[in-house]
Amino acid sequence: MALTQVAAGLLAGSITSSQITSVAASTLTGTQTIPRGTLPTGSVLQVVSTTLTTGFSASVNNSFSAVTGLTAIITPSSASSKVMITITMTVGSDTNYLNAKITKGGTAISGAIATAAGNRSLGTSAAWPVASYGTYDMTLSYLDSPATTSATTYGVQIGNNSTATLCVNQSQSDDNVAGRTRGTSTITVMEIAA
């Protein structure tokens, strides 16, 4: 005899997704898609990352210069999403300090910049290299609210309020001498459900 009823009021073949209240994860097979709208606030929806492995150098005079090649483009799935930006850099300088600023669309994000204080150089992060042949680690992070579903480019600028040569992934004295160092820098952006 064929089974025609699996539960009271449910005929075989007539179960809909709205009638399923829970399913053990161990019973799921194949590719499953969870609608983004059902994910809780704070869930990571997508990640984009770029690593710069080549050296970069810029001469500044009370100005900032965009670091070429250290950008990431993300297209948020919702205008309410947040974007977490994390940048790690290897930096060098021929002066005693440098600042870095997180940018969106090529413009520094004002909310990610230190509060003005006299004539101090301001940025998202700062480093005080003590020698032209040294390299130093720098980390920048910021949670942005882009309020868009359009492709958005995040990046970084380096500079200070004096005349200087600033470098990324290399020291200012980037000559081929034993003891000189090079590194890599990475920008990672994550869409966070709001």
Image (cartoon, helix red, strand yellow):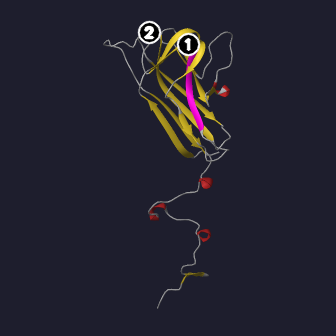
Q: Which mark, residue 132?
A: 2
Would residue 42 be counted in the magenta stretch?
Answer: no
Q: Which mark, residue 60?
A: 1
The magenta segment is 152-160
Instruction: Residue type at mark 2: give it.
Output: Ser
184 shown above or below 126: below
Q: Under tag 2, what secondary structure?
A: loop
Residue at the far left: name it: 178
Q: On the picture, is 117 further left or further right than 34?
A: right
- Estimate the x, y position of residue 43 in percent, counting from the top left: 57, 46
Observer-side mark, 2 or 1, equals 1
Q: Under tag 1, what secondary structure?
A: strand
Compute the Cα span from label 2 to label 1.
Answer: 15 Å
Instruction: Residue type at mark 1: give it.
Output: Val
- Give the quadrant of the C terminus: top right
Instruction: Please name the predominant secondary structure of the magenta segment in the image.
Output: strand
- Circle 1 residues within 10 Å: few <14, some 14–19, many ≥20: some
- Circle 2 residues within 10 Å: few <14, some 14–19, many ≥20: some
188 shown above or below 119: below
Question: Camera-side residue: 140 or 75?
Answer: 75
